Image (tube, grey):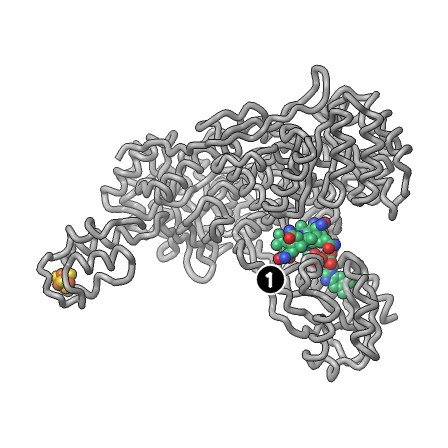
Amino acid sequence: MAFVVPKENYSGKVLEVEIGTGPKAVKIGGENTLPYLAFEGQVPNKTVVAYEIQDVPPEDWPSTVQSAYKDVSADPVKWALYCQNELGAQMIALRLIGTHPDRQDRSPEEAAKTVVAVLAAIDVPLIILGSNHAEKDAQVLKAACDATAGKNCLVGKAQEANYKTIVASAMAAGHKIIAMSDLDVNLSKQLNILITQMGFDKGKIVTDPMSSALGYGIEYTYSVMERIRQAALLQNDPTMSPPLVNDIGMYVWKVKETIAPESDLPEWGGLEERAIGWETTTAMGLLMAGSNLLIMRHPKAIATVRKMVDELV
Amino acid sequence: MAISGVEIFKHLPKTNCKKCGHPTCLAFAMKLAAQQASLDACPDASEDAKAFLGAASEPPIRRITIGAGDKALKVGEETVLSRHEKKFVNPCGFALVVNDTDSAIEAKAKSVADSEIERVGQKLRVELVAVKDASGDALTFSGAVGKVVAAAPNVGVVLMSANVEALKGALAQLSGKKPLIYAADAGNWEQMVELAKGAGASLVVKADGLEALSDLVEKVVASGFKDLMLDPSPKSPKDMVEQYTQIRRAALKKSYKPFGFPIFSVAVDADPLVEQARASVCIAKYASVVVMSDASKWKTLALMALRQNLYTDPQVPMQVKANLYKIGDANENSPLMITTNFSLTYFIVLGEVENSKVPAWILVMDSEGLSVLTAWAAGKFTAAKIAQYIDESGIKDKVASKELIIPGYVAVLSGSLEEKLPGWKITVGPREANGLPAFLKNKVS
Ligand code: B12
Ligand code: SF4
């Protein structure tokens, strides 16, 4: 018996999406194989990692990750520049968490000002994220889009409850959008269909399957992603073909494993390494399930994941 | 295993004697192919027929056992490429590699023996110690193995050496313990097979790339030895993903026999975080044994969690029994909390209640294994259902206080619960379970 490499025949392809303008614009997606199987197809773009920053100081971030930005995080522009210039960020993801009604309840106008200031300072592409409050996000992201037209940003998250306003604003501004649904293949497909029915180009959508942290439901995200990828590539379903984003920082940096001191749980080992490793391992798991874009927090976790991404192609 | 009735028929006696209860040998063969009959029913079946059907009914990926007793590691027997198709069967094992020259070898072996932790009701651990022949000296190697066996008698052992003398000395100390030998290559495989056979050990077959590996495995199998694992010697994570995928695919989709064995993977890297990241790739991409050079608790905790998560049943969430659980020395005046029967939810809440040292009751309601918010969104954790459960559970006889603490995330339920449970006080607890210790201490003080 001679060994013959068992190759899969893929009829579909992940859509390629470009974000940003100028020499540092990035492309994600575009592969026509399951994750990182270049022996049977093309993987033109590596997974990109964006650094998450916020419009307000990250007081709710656990100390391990808060301390990594302690000198810059009071000012989103400084914070963004630090990530870009000192840490070599490929992309910045600005989360407008201060707009959440339970937080500072900042106005859409204030939020838009922050976005414009950050965008003016950096030359890497920008992801603009709301606070995950469906109604407020619609207003905030609209204001942000209106103020940033032509900059080819990635804006999100558009969800079933608020996609109409966000999609319309993004379309007017020429932006790309993140479409997020609740961990369900069919809901994800349905949202993509609703969005394209508004006349939005499917090649400008990035799918957020909804992430979950290692140990707290990651297997659900993992399998939903694998199923979306297989639908796109093996069944050539164009409504499942956008690239995948995983916004993991907010899930990882709230679980006990990234917070509890070693003195409370000696059997879990040192907190700092444990917390960074938790974010790294979460990202690696989802990378294997097909992530094209990761939004992460800790510089060491990001550096490790980027090294792995380089070694996967 | 798809094998046609006609194929099977060729191996039957073709006498149509009907002793099997079927009118003809061919009819019987069809039943066998459909796995609706067993060859035992034909008294005249030849040894050849038995061997043929035996091979055909073997699992596509052979099971390998490393170590003995209740801590033995069992790997292989996988049936799918994606976990959503069907549950992954046997979680991969973790091996800590130690050099035979390492003066800390006993302490390291002991750390593996003591690595067990509990997570979501399951006991998880690092299963194996891999002793590496760094000295090139047979006595040093077998001495090191002796130390490992003494320090960690119940831990499975991997012997990493190409030196026949060294292995002989080591194997002599491992009789009955089913060690794994790493590795047979094109140059030494005959000797290695002989050693493994003689010692009841399994053997990793190692070659450079899949073609060479396939050739070598065929030789080894032809020599009559099949307790094998595979190492195609990946040079990078890219190789790992590609080669391991091809092996798994060949075994499952093409019934390619030379690759019908579990994968042995070396994830070692000098940077512990990179090693953790590499090991994550191995866990997701089909490795059955993952070798690491460092098994710090912070690191293995995450890897054990990833392994546990990816090997859970995708159809059935892990659940605990719906019941009233008494935590600590709870009495009729102790606080009463309600939650759902998703294992993850229950064990997180349990951990925090235990943390608080406050004796308490946890009432676990059947939500078909859904978390609090998911169950609420799915209509399985509603005021009406909770009220009904409280009525039926008999809890009223055990708890005098008539105060029910509900998860903060379902605070919206409190009004309707008070309506449906007359005489009860509904208290909204913290949203995250890690707020419970402060909450409970405050409550009883
Ligand atoms: C994994 C997941 C699923 C899995 C199911 C997992 C499971 N076994 O439950 C699947 C994919 C099946 C699923 C399905 C759905 N899901 Co879902 N899912 C999640 C996800 C990602 C994680 C849930 C989880 O495992 N949490 C971990 C456990 C431990 O959390 P927990 O049980 O709440 O416990 C915590 C606290 O509540 C507290 N706690 C628990 N008990 C107690 C008790 C007391 C007394 C106290 C004080 C505290 C306390 O402690 C725990 C830790 O802090 C969440 C989003 C997220 N990241 O949180 C959405 C989420 C829960 N799902 C949601 C929804 C809407 C659904 C669906 C209805 C949607 C759909 N796709 O059809 C379905 C419904 C299920 C059905 N019809 O079968 C929503 C709920 C929104 C809402 N507020 O109503 C969420 C929040 C997502 C979102 N939109 O943001 N989901
Ligand atoms: S018992 Fe065996 S030989 Fe007889 S009919 Fe059945 S299969 Fe044929």
Q: Residue at x 31, y 33 (%)?
A: A3
Which of the pair B212/A34 is nearer the observer? A34
Compared with residue B94, is residue B281 higher up or lower down, i.e. above or below?
above
Ligand 2, seen in the image, is in the quarter at bottom left
Compared with residue B42, is residue A181 higher up or lower down, i.e. above or below?
above
Which residue sits furthest top? A23
Which residue sits furthest bottom? B397
Q: Residue at x 68, y 31 (%)?
A: A199
Q: Residue at x 61, y 59 (%)?
A: B118
On the rendered structure, is A67 left or right of A195? right
Chain of the residue under the numbered disc 1 shown in the image? B
On the rendered structure, is B371 left or right of B188? right
The type of residue carrying mark 1 is Gly
Q: Quadrant of residue B137?
A: top left
Q: Position of residue B288 (x, y in %)?
A: 45, 46
On the rendered structure, is A52 left or right of A2? right
Q: Residue at x 54, y 41 (%)?
A: A226
Q: Position of residue B316 (x, y in %)?
A: 54, 59
Compared with residue A311, is residue A253 higher up or lower down, i.e. above or below?
below
Which of the pair B108/B426 is nearer the observer? B426
Q: Report if the beta carbon of the residue with label 1 is closer than 8 angstroms to ligand 1.
A: no
Q: Say whether residue B404 is visible.
A: yes
Q: Say whether residue A266 is visible.
A: no
Q: Position of residue A29 (x, y in %)?
A: 59, 28
